[in-house]
Amino acid sequence: MTPVDCRWMDLARQLATLCPPRSTAFAVGVVIVDADGNELARGYSRETGPHEHAEEVALTKVAGDPRLATAILYSTLEPCSQRRSRARSCVQLILETGVPRVVMAEREPNRFVADPQGYEVLTAAGVDVLEACR
């Protein structure tokens, strides 16, 4: 974990404060950065609709961008491994884009999902996942 990682995470935390409140969902912010340290996209939970997750919002903004293959995704919460409102989880979306590194501020509590497995699924697929910058 570097000071640069923590600066990007601070931005993700600021984005999380923009989330419309919802008692049945977390407020999450995400920033995606390319290998040269340039911001590719940002997003926050429910930014574009009532069921959108932050990772989903940000990844949609850069869909098909070849820079995702060397990008870092910063999220204030462990990407979801299960979704009730969508066919694909945020973990699946990340794996489909080929993002090789995810930095998350904390693990997903089991408040809405009985057994969150985002960290485990990502690492098993070869993604470098760091939990830090609390």
Image: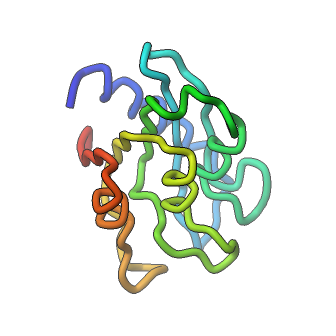
Is residue 22 placed above or below 32 in the rendered structure? Answer: below
Q: Position of residue 33 (x, y in %)?
A: 49, 26
Count of residue discs: 0
Is residue 105 placed above or below 112 in the rendered structure? Answer: above
Quarter of the view holding residue 90: bottom right
Residue at 56 percent of width and 45 percent of height? 97
Quarter of the view holding residue 17: top right
Q: Position of residue 24 (x, y in %)?
A: 59, 75
Residue at 45 percent of width and 58 percent of height? 79
Residue at 48 percent of width and 60 percent of height? 91
Which quarter of the figure is the C terminus placed in?
Answer: top left
Which quarter of the figure is the N terminus placed in?
Answer: top left
Q: Position of residue 51 (x, y in %)?
A: 71, 65
Query: Relative to 116, is 56 on the left or the right?
Result: right
Between residues 117 and 69, which one lies in front from this camera angle? 69
Residue at 63 percent of width and 50 percent of height? 19
Between residues 87 and 124, which one lies in front from this camera angle? 124
Extreme-bottom residue of the structure: 114
